[in-house]
Image (spheres, grey):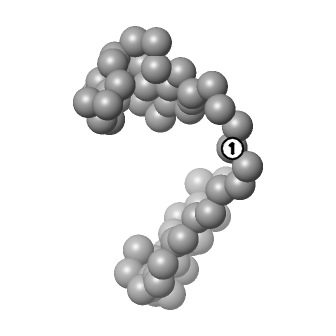
Amino acid sequence: MDETVDIGMDVASPVSPDYGPTSNAFTGTIGWVRLDAGDDDHNHLIDPEHRMLAAMVRLERR
């Protein structure tokens, strides 16, 4: 619960024993970043029937 999405340093528990819990700020330069998302099987999407139901609920609340 106390873990956060820290950028440049880790203020909670370290992700590696290679550096300590304090004074671990990144001081270098990032030249580029590559993100490989991989294949998406779309199993997180709702089916068309439930999508229509969600739209109808939103319309009723207006």
> Disc 1 on helix, strand or loop?
loop
Residue 4 makes an appearance in the image? yes
Comparing 38 with 16, the one in front is 16
Residue sitting at x 52%, y 72%: 37
For the C terminus, which image quadrant? bottom right
Residue 50 makes an appearance in the image? no
For the N terminus, which image quadrant? top left
Residue 26 in the figure: left or right of residue 31: left
Against 19, residue 5 (above or below) is below
Outermost residue, top direction?
22
Q: Residues within 10 Å of mark 1 (few under 14, many from 20)?
A: few
Against 39, residue 33 (above or below) is above
Residue sitting at x 46%, y 20%: 24
Q: How many marks?
A: 1
Residue placed under numbered mark 1 in the picture: 30
User: Residue 14 lies in what quarter of the image?
Assistant: top left
> What is the x, y in percent for residue 19?
35, 25
Residue 16 in the figure: left or right of residue 45: left
Against 7, residue 51 (above or below) is below
Residue sitting at x 59%, y 54%: 61
Residue 19 in the figure: left or right of residue 48: left
> What is the x, y in percent for residue 17?
26, 30
> What is the x, y in percent for residue 28?
65, 32
> What is the x, y in percent for residue 6?
50, 30
Residue sitting at x 34%, y 17%: 21
| Residue type of the residue flagged with mark 1 | Ile
